[in-house]
Amino acid sequence: MTPQAAATPQTQAGKEAPWWEIAIIIALYLVIHFINSGLDQIYVLLVIIYLIIEGILRHHTWADNGFGLRSILPGLNKTWGWCLLVAFGTQAAFLLGGRFFLPEVFEYVIKRTPIDLTSLTPALFIGLAIATFEEEFLFRAVFQNRLGKWVPPAFAIGAISLVFAIAHYSSGSPLVVGVHLISVFVDSVIFGIIFQQSRNVFVSWIPHYVADIFATLMILALR
């Protein structure tokens, strides 16, 4: 295949961001997040502006970023097994294991949860919806989607899941923190697989949202 022929598909699909630009976007997120996690929403806004500008300059559509509404149902149908696993299976395994075998991990999860778990209110479910969508938007539609243009999908999923776990770090006992971050990493890998197979951020967001709701209900029941 000639260089000209190899370049044709890329031209038709739109020019891709260079790898260093992706690295800067991810590194900037980690810096902002650890300086003040309250600035995450500002970062999300900046990323949205970045995507709008990129769409104009590089001829990308929102569907290219994983926002295809028509592919939601086909994507869910294709990934339903993974969706059920991460929405219920891994949450139940981690929380039940923590509650009965590593109670310090269970208490650690409760203490680091940034939302009020004392009651089931509309604000709780709205907050979970916004938080989980922001995470899927950044980590799958932006980070994984772009890194996956330059590295094999498995590497992109693993690397972004590592970043996802790091972003969920908070101080504590090394054993407790380690067990928690492993669970976060595993969930992120599954979300990454769902996005990779569906190419739709809504498809990876739905099980993420359900997983957080289910985990919240389990925490309330097990406390």
Image (cartoon, rainbow, N blue to C red):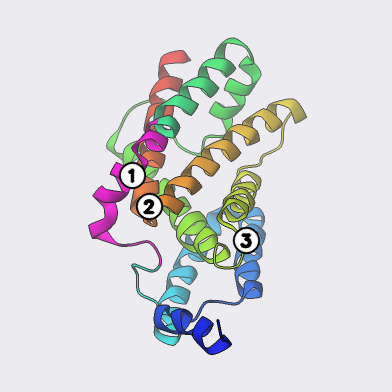
Residue labelled with disc 2? 198
Q: Position of residue 115 (x, y in %)?
A: 45, 37
Q: Is residue 140 left or right of residue 182?
A: left
Question: Looking at this rendering, what residue extends furthest in the top direction?
Answer: 100
Residue labelled with disc 1? 78
Mark positioned earlier in the residue sequence (1 or 3): 3
Residue labelled with disc 3? 32
Q: Residue at x 28, y 37 (%)?
A: 122
Asked where in the image residue 59 lies, by quadrant, the reply is: bottom left
Residue 117 in view (yes/no): no
Asked where in the image residue 53 lies, by quadrant, the reply is: bottom left
Amino acid found under the numbered disc labelled 1: Lys
Q: Position of residue 83 (x, y in %)?
A: 38, 37
Query: Helix, strand or loop at disc 2?
Result: helix
Tell me how far mark 2 sits from mark 3, CA to CA: 30 Å
Amino acid found under the numbered disc labelled 2: Ser
Instruction: Tell me which segment is drawn in magenta.
Output: 65-84
